[in-house]
Amino acid sequence: MTEPTGRRERKKAQTRQSLADAALELFLECGYDQVGVKDVADAADVSVTTLFKHFSGKEALVFDQDDDLEAALVAAVRDRTDGQSIPQALREHILLKQTQLAVHATDSRFADFTRLVQETPALRDYAQRMWTRHEAALARAIAEAVGVPEDEVSCAALARFALESRSLILRHPEPRRAADEAFALLEHGWAAAHPGS
Amino acid sequence: MTEPTGRRERKKAQTRQSLADAALELFLECGYDQVGVKDVADAADVSVTTLFKHFSGKEALVFDQDDDLEAALVAAVRDRTDGQSIPQALREHILLKQTQLAVHATDSRFADFTRLVQETPALRDYAQRMWTRHEAALARAIAEAVGVPEDEVSCAALARFALESRSLILRHPEPRRAADEAFALLEHGWAAAHPGS
DNA sequence: TGAAATAAGTGCAACGACTACACTTTCATA
DNA sequence: TATGAAAGTGTAGTCGTTGCACTTATTTCA
């Protein structure tokens, strides 16, 4: 299912990959704003038109795989271990998915990538939207987990706040501690409204 | 101090006003995306260059007076009545400043304005940024009010969450109830971290 | 196997927001 | 009243993005 069957799909995927690779390399080397969309297309040896057939905009060149995000987020709530509260589960997930990898840079390329995103306003904002785009799905998952109607405001609020705290954590020198403090707030607030979950 | 002294400043203010008026009228009539920046300039009888000397971008044409926002926000925390918690004060302020006016439309023009903003992604996002831009100032005010160092994460978190809940409230059919629920979460969480404030 | 349908990729021209530049007009002030 | 600062103008350009008509490669199916 992950394997492209025909030659056509394979070439398509390859073109997309070339574009993403070229973009990241150029952005890292010269800075996001110094590189035009034309430069990326040229480096990948395709036309600008083709570039926009693959990516919805310049910022999207950097975030290749945003599809898993929502599923993982929902799963983090649904499949949390017994006794773990929803805010705790979300803190773990966000911390794992974002910060730990970036800080203990196993791969120095990932650290560079994160720095690029954090230092470029356009990309920082885009990343934030990427996450917030899944607010509704997360809110629904939370509502289902506690067994309340899915339009409960407190669920939407928890979803939004948790997703927002991501950027709060990311910019802090000690992400783990920041996450603990930010989520402590949510933890207590949530417990008051929904005891025992 | 609010009175422009010379004729020059008066004309400048007038030009700015013409632009803002023309923009709002056109946007309301035809929709934000259907109106070009050129159309606005023409309607105000100035050049496009001049338009951009007055406003930093197309979206800014709609939000004329964002300067008071920060001061009012800080004041809402600093000058809250005794016995009122910080989250309560923020809920009141946001509710008053945003939602009440929009709902009980004293002025139907204000309702139209709010609808325009909410229905136009570019404007909705810009408005959200406008508020979030003052997160740091609000966080500082909160930290000062409780007497903790100004880089306390919980203060930044409360500031961010409160500002974010604005849009949560705005899109809800019953803003008052939504505000109560969202801020209840913050209320309890905050009380746990900073008892008695 | 050999069309015919399908989809990727191309080049060009254009649009809209925005900026740089060199210029004119208008006002304040010494 | 002369001088300089500041408001305004028009043009031409950049950059991201889209529409269009077109070629080329691959899949499908009669």
Image: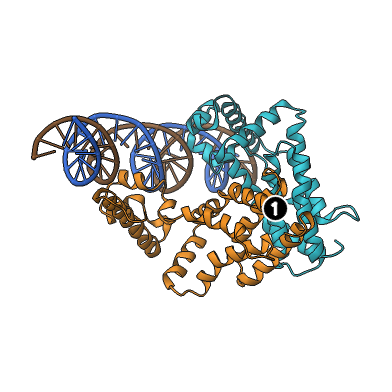
Chain colours: A orange, B cyan, C brown, D blue
Left or right: where A191 falls relative to D17? right
What's the residue at 67%, 48% (across, down)? A156
Q: How crowded is mark 1: few (under 14 residues within 10 Å), some or many (20 or more)?
A: some
Residue found farthest to the top: B29
All told, the count of numbered labels is 1
| Quadrant assignment for the N terminus of chain A | bottom left
Which chain is mark 1 on?
Answer: A
Left or right: where A63 falls relative to A72? left
Asked whether residue B83 appears in the rendered view, the answer is yes
Dot 1 corresponds to which residue?
A146
Residue found farthest to the right: B82
* Displayed quadrant of residue B102: top right
Residue B149 % position (x, y): 75, 70
B54 shown above or below A76 = above
Asked whether residue B75 appears in the rendered view, the answer is no
Residue A37 % position (x, y): 35, 50
Left or right: where B55 falls relative to B104? left
Report helix, strand or loop for mark 1: helix
What's the residue at 48%, 35% (across, down)? B48
A53 shown above or below B44 = below
Residue type of the residue flagged with mark 1: Val
Left or right: where B126 falls relative to C4? right
Q: Which of B132 and B189 is in front in this view?
A: B189
B78 shown above or below A151 = below
* Displayed quadrant of residue B179: top right
Residue B152 % position (x, y): 72, 68
Q: Which of A22 and B60 is in front in this view?
A: A22
Residue B53 % position (x, y): 54, 41
A117 shown above or below D23 = below
| Quadrant assignment for the C terminus of chain A | bottom right
Q: Which of B47 and C10 is in front in this view?
A: C10
